[in-house]
Each structure stands twice: as structure tokens, then as C-alpha cells.
Amino acid sequence: MVQLERTRGSQCTVRRAATFTLAESLIRPSFTDTNLEDPRQLAEVLRELANSAGLLKQKRWSLSLPEASTQTLVLTLETQVHSSSELQEVLTWKMERGFGAPLEELAVSKERLPKDAQGRDRYLAIATTRTVLAEYENVFASLGWRIGLILPRHFGEAQWLLRNGAVGDSLLLSAAEEGGFTAVIFRDKAPLIIRTVNCVAEESEDELFRLLLFYRDRRTGDTQESQSPLSRLMIIGEGFTKERAREIVNETTGGDLRPLEAHDLGLQLPGRELSFDAIAAPAGLATLSW
């Protein structure tokens, strides 16, 4: 739970913040199944957390949902459509196939992306099921809080890479402690590749290597794309040893990057007791209010 204060230019500092380690049984993130075992207990935890952060009177919030509670797709249209109804029909078909659920069961946010190197139309679609979303909304409503913006965790974290006129290709690795990760590669400010990999911790390095080979081949396969090398790297979470993840990225892409830290991104933390990894997602959402 984070509140930021803008200082000068694009710089900001943490005004108020609090963290709490939840019992694993309290939230079980899932795209299709029940997420909250005891909504009343979660509401009490959030109330206590807001009190300790000095935000108990705050009524308007943005929410970063657990990674497994959402799905994100980049949809590419292989052929040109000739009407809005045809476009909606094609997007609906792609979303239902990609998300594995009828569209009426989903809460979907979508936006048009820049065309790809072949001139094909692309769209970004973010979804959660309506039943799962209602679970979280009901908890906030019981506290008298209004949720404005709701995004998956990796898109909250990614806001730090997209600030200050980001140019070129950027990579976000958002790792899970139990293994697996979400990787998002941005070209300028638009998602180019999004992959969520579910695997045991021992397989994460191999899966990352495969993803980076796919990105490298895609980039070098087109003369225009080959001029946009990976220029920024951000690693969040404990699923990777950050130094080892850095080595894999640099060995595969031929770069010499280091993971960006809070001070590189214009965020001043109040001492070492507050981890950037722990607050990157909600703090990233907070920057969207400026």
C-alpha cells in the first residue's frame, strides 16, 4: 500500500507506505477459481494496513491484482478487416480462444497498439473473469473504498520503464518466488512480447533463455527491428537471482545491461527497510495520476 509524492520534474518519493505478509491461504490467485477464502479477514487486514500507513481516510484507490488472477494478450490481425463489426468479431474470437472463456464471462480492457513490422494491426487485451474481479471489488466496497484503475501486477511494475519518454526496447522480468515469471518486452511504450511462464524454480533459467532467443531472432529477422536493441532491464521478485538473470539477458542479446534500481527510475525510498520489489507495482500505478 503506497502513496507517492511528486518532487521535481519526473522525480518522486514515497510519502506513505506499508506492507504486510499475507497467509498463503488468504489469497489464492487464480484466473478461474475463487481467490479469497475469507473476504472479511482480508478487509480487516487492509484496514489495519491503511491505518499503519496513515491512509485510513483515503477513499480512492488503484489496485494491482495478483499475476495469476489476470491474463494479458497481444492480438495480431493476420488479415485486414473492413468494418467495425468484422473487427469486433475477429477480436472476440481471438480473445475467447486466448483467454479460454466466453467473452461475457470476462472483464476485458483493450487498446490498439502500433502496427508490427509487417504492417499488421495489433491490440493489447487484459482480462480477468467477472466473478474473480467481483471478489476484490466487494472487499474494497465493504471498506467504503472506490477502485478506479485495476491492472495486473506486471503492468504496475512496467510503468517505471515507460516513464520519461522511453525509447527503444525494454525488458521487464517479474518473477514469482515459487518459480516462473512474466516477461514483457516493450518497444518504446508499446508491448511487443508478453509471456507468462509457469514452471518450477529450477526451470526458470532455461525458460528465460528460450524467450530471449525468440526475441533475438524476431529482432534480427527484420532490418528495421534490428536497429532497436534492448536498452533497459528491470528485474522484480525473488524467483531469479538478479545477477544470474542479468548474465542470461546479456549473453543472449549481446548487451551490457544492469537491472535498474529505484534511484535509476526517479523514485526515492525512505531508507533500506522498504524494498522496491515489494512496492514497485502499486507505486507504478500511483505514477499514473500525474
Image (cartoon, grey):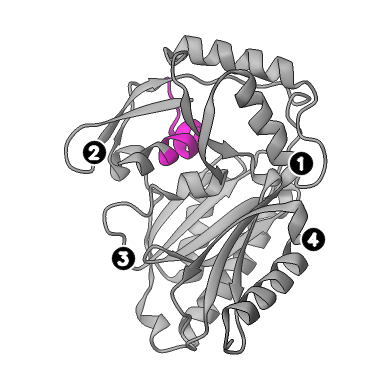
Q: Earlier in the sequence, mark 3 or mark 4?
A: 4
Where residue 289 sits, quadrant-wise, is top left
> Which type of secondary structure does the marked residue at label 2 adopt?
loop
As measured in the structure, the alpha-carbon distance from the residue carrying label 4 to the one carrying label 1 is: 13 Å
Q: What number is the disc on residue 102?
A: 4
Majority SS type along the magenta span: helix
Q: Amino acid at mark 1?
A: Thr
x, y percent for residue 5: 28, 29
Number of other residues with Cα within 10 Å of mark 2, as a class: few under 14, some 14 to 19, many 20 or more: few
Residue position for label 1:
131
Question: Who is closer to the viewer here, 270 or 155?
Answer: 155
Question: Who is closer to the viewer here, 244 or 173?
Answer: 173
Left or right? Give the position of 175 relative to 89.
left
**Residue at the spot 55% in from the left edge and 42% down from the top edge:** 150
Q: What number is the disc on residue 11?
A: 2
Q: Are marks 1 and 3 in contact (CB under 8 Å)?
A: no
As measured in the structure, the alpha-carbon distance from the residue carrying label 2 to the one carrying label 3 is: 19 Å
> Which type of secondary structure does the marked residue at label 1 adopt?
helix
Residue position for label 3:
167
Q: Amino acid at mark 4?
A: Pro
Number of other residues with Cα within 10 Å of mark 3, as a class: few under 14, some 14 to 19, many 20 or more: some
> Which type of secondary structure does the marked residue at label 4 adopt?
loop
Compared with 10, 102 (above or below) is: below
**Residue that lies at the very extreme toward the left in this rendered image:** 8
Q: Amino acid at mark 2?
A: Gln
Q: Earlier in the sequence, mark 2 or mark 4?
A: 2
